[in-house]
Amino acid sequence: MDNRALQVLVALPCALVGWQILKRATAKDPFAHISGPPSTSMLVGNFFELFSKDSWDYNFELAKKYGRVSHIHGVLNKPMLFVFDPKALYHILVKDQYVFDEPDDFIRINNAMFGPGLLATMGDHHRKQRKLLNPVFSVGHMKEMTPVFYNVVRKLENSIKQQITQGKTEVRRPDSMRTDFVALNKSIDILSWMTRTALELIGQSGFGYSFDSLKPDSTQHPFGVSLKNLFESLLARVFIWPWVVNIGSPSFQRAVVNALPWKGLHDVRDMIDVMHTTSVEIFEATKRSLEKGEDLSAKIGGGKDIMSILIKANMAASEEDKLPEKELLAQISTLTFAAMDTTSNALARIFDLLSQNQDVQDKVREEVTAAYEEHGGILDYETLTSLSWLDAVCRETLRLYPSVPTLFRQARKDTILPFAEPILTRDGKEISEVFVPARTPVTFSILSCNRDPKIWGADAAEWKPQRWLNPLPDSVANARVPGVYSHLMTFIGGGRACIGFKFSQLEMKVILSVLLQSFKFEPNGKKVIWQMNGIVQPTTEDAELGADGEQKLQLPLKVSLVKAIQ
């Protein structure tokens, strides 16, 4: 592509941006009467204050100062609502879910990155895909997959033991001739291990495929690296990719990406290529095995993996319910993207909290150790879900620290959004609903709803696992928060609720129960910083800078064996 064509490609978006800014400046603001923070930029509104890596205080202050419904400004200063009112959330996610659907750019970006999977479809198309996928995420299927989870997590346990015992030291007891070999504490990057394990779990139980041997010195699979890095390519994904995927044919879009002199955009292109190539490899191998009628019991996952069952179910489905192969293929990257970083970062947060709260860590360890002593090396699904302290730690962490703090919807037509309780307008009037024009974006805060003191009480901002060991306040049930999990918005609700939340719960509980039985986790002295990167991720104050100038994501903790190795 010559320089003149490149200049045109750059000039067109600039002209469109200028036109949109002029249009916004002269348009009537439908939410002018609703209180909220002033816009700080004609280009990005409140976007960077609300969604930057260190925007925790801004989010908390926004909820505290303006309440459950406020007026914010989006990209190009577009008026938006910021909402965590339970009744409004119910209408957005459940009652009027086909009015408030995913934003157009979200659908286009996901289709370009992953193909036409769950994250890139809407309406009847989305429901059709979920209908085929629902059985493989049922409790019944999770029970069948529990042994596969243990096979993976025991590898993780052994590798961490290897890391620790590389530094054994002799300690001679003064009252005995016996020598104990006690492992030193080791600083171990828990985030790295959680990410690798999450990928291997979705690989084996999801696709009958192994991404990672989980050995301490093994190289991470390019598929996992690409998925991980996609989250960090925020600017390229959010601001540039929507323009690119909205012009011309796929081949023309590819030419535009190749021509634009921006490494970040080229990196996104290369990540997508790696994910697509790996997905095709997994899909074709599974399809060939099924077409040949091979015995899948010896395959990774025992033939019970999600993709094997999905392809078989699709073969048996009626023509009305059958999905095209490209949609089955798209589920591989889609499900891995949705499952890997959210759960791995939630687990990292739990280990960080347990390292700071040794009394709680001890209670969970005592509980899981007793369970393994009674039931053996594998706890079945019912036993895992019955462990009260383990469950309380998971629920409380997912309440207070959801991996995804905020999400977006877009009104598809003019509508009325009602509130659970009236709000005061700028001129002091009480209103119980607001008119939302078509194509208006709405941001809903998972974080603020989960921490709402009107629902959870005065201690809503405190991490207290014990709150789940007693009956919850009546205000929790009375709020009618439309979440699929524990009166929380963490996995949202309605037709686009997280389809894999039971998978995530099983993963968390198997990993926590195995590792807490064997290891003690303590802070290693480095200050941990949790960043809002779309998905909340940890780093440390002194973390090394990568080639992109960003701090390396990590969670180093001091890890030691619960029982001395002799």
Image (tube, rainbow, N blue to C red):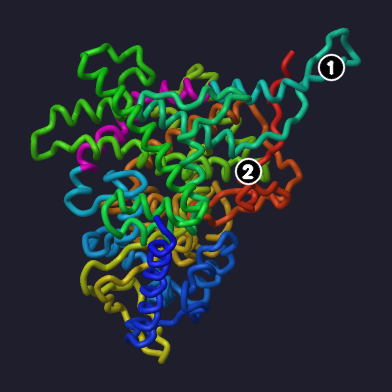
Q: Say what amino acid the circle numbered 2 marks.
A: Gln
Q: Which residues are magenta?
A: 129-154
**On screen, 62 above or below 429?**
above
Is residue 558 depicted above or below 235 in this figure?
above
Residue position for label 1: 170
Q: Is residue 290 left or right of residue 371?
A: left
Q: At 25% from the left edge and 27% from the top edge, which residue is drawn?
A: 309
Q: Residues within 10 Å of mark 2 (few under 14, many from 20)?
A: many
* Element class at badge 2: loop
Between 164 and 330, the residue placed more toward the observer is 330
Please check the rendered image and state whether residue 338 is part of the magenta-colored stretch, yes or no. no
Indicate the quadrant where residue 337 lies: top left
User: Farthest residue toward the left?
Assistant: 319
Question: Residue 253: which disc?
Answer: none
Quadrant location of residue 531?
Answer: bottom right
Residue 110: x and y in percent read 34, 50
Secondary structure found at label 1: strand
What residue is shown at x 40% (from left), y 59% (from top)?
Answer: 407
- Count how many numbered circles sit on residues in the image: 2
User: Residue 554 got which mark?
Assistant: 2
The three-letter code of the residue at mark 1 reads: Glu
- Specify whether residue 402 is in view: no
